[in-house]
Image: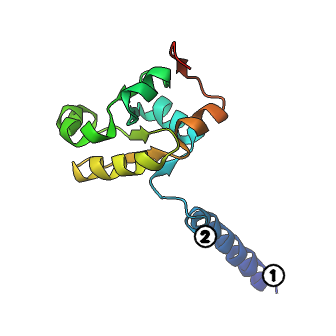
Amino acid sequence: MDFVVSNIVWIVLALASGLGLLLPLLRGRNANQVSPAQAVMLINRQRAVMIDVRDAAEVEKSKIANALAIPLGELADKAKELTKYKSRPVIVLCANGSRAVTGVETLTKAGFEQVFSLEGGLKAWKDAGQPVISGSKS
């Protein structure tokens, strides 16, 4: 009887673990998205590079320190200049996360293997209490 109970516990544990892995997909979360907290961990542990694909006027208002500012329309052309970062995780961000998905696709097509979009974009970054540099315009 103890054997049966032990197996049931393991089966329930395996199902719960599998559900935890599937939850982001069930909620519609893109597998290539990272939360602000996950982005910070990638930056600190693996020297991830952040690429801000917003236009220059948006970046001038506020930005994340050390993020490379490359407007989305220029990203494909500048991908060759970014090859030195191919071995590191790259996190693409925009205002709310929608343009970053296109940036991830662009860099993936250019041969980058570890490319992520910042879920919720700069707004989520700010909401999470992460630091930003504010420009003179508001």
Relative image position of residue 25 (x, y in whole percent): 55, 66
Relative image position of residue 100 (x, y in whole percent): 42, 45
Image side of residue 42 versus residue 112, left or right: right
Relative image position of residue 79 (x, y in whole percent): 22, 39
Residue drawn at x 55%, y 22% is 132
Image side of residue 53 versus residue 29, left or right: left
Residue drawn at x 50%, y 38% is 95
Q: Decide which of tag 1 and tag 2 comes sooner along the chain.
A: 1
Q: Which mark is residue 2?
A: 1
Element class at badge 1: helix
Relative image position of residue 40 (x, y in whole percent): 54, 33
**Between residues 5 and 34, which one lies in front from this camera angle?**
34
Residue drawn at x 29%, y 39% is 87
Image side of residue 18 versus residue 137, left or right: right
Q: Which mark is residue 58?
A: none
Question: Which residue sits furthest right?
Answer: 1
| Colour option used | rainbow
